[in-house]
Image (spheres, rainbow, N blue to C red):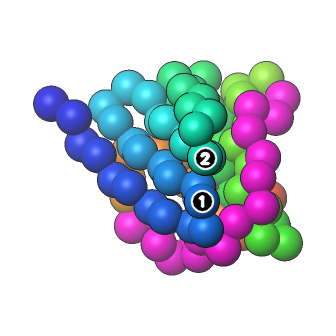
Amino acid sequence: MILALIVLSESLEITIEDKQILLKMDDKVESLHKEEISAIFIDNNELTILSKSGHELYRTTTDIRVETMSRFNSVPKITESGSC
């Protein structure tokens, strides 16, 4: 079963599935496996996704609101200003 959420932010499209998160900007698509992700946060209008080892997996400027992303329990806790 695929639980999908599509969030549009300017040209960023995020799809959250059972085992992965797809990030599409224009024609470029990046896939991140959920088990690799430790944190997702928004700081100064930048969406950042960190790995369990603390490395940055993804960063982009966005207008997505934390409240929009926080409604979904299928991803790690999403916070503002990088705090988890």
- Describe the element under mark 1 as helix, strand or loop: loop
Q: 10 Å neighbourhood of mark 2: few (<14), some, or many (≥20)?
A: few
What number is the disc on residue 23?
A: none
- The N terminus lies in quadrant: top left
Residue 78 drawn above or below residue 36: below
Q: Position of residue 53 (x, y in %)?
A: 79, 23
Is residue 20 covered in magenta? no
Q: Is residue 60 magenta?
A: yes
Residue 20: x %, y % from top left: 44, 29
N-term-proximal mark, 1 vs 2: 1
Q: Secondary structure at mark 2?
A: loop
Quarter-of-image position of residue 79: bottom right
Q: Nearer the viewer, residue 70 or 13?
A: 13
**Residue at x 61% of width, y 68% of height:** 10
Q: Which mark is residue 26?
A: 2
From the viewer's side, name the closer residue of 80 and 64. Answer: 64
Along the line of sight, the residue nearer the viewer: 62 or 34:
62
CB under 8 Å between discs 1 and 2: yes
Question: Residue 80 location in percent, x, y?
Answer: 72, 69
- C-alpha separation, residue under disc 1 versus residue under disc 2: 6 Å
The amino acid sitting under disc 2 is Asp
Kindly identify which residue carries mark 1. Answer: 11
Q: Is residue 31 above or below residue 10?
A: above
Q: Which residues are magenta?
A: 55-71
Picture residue at 41% right of the left edge, 45% below the top: 15
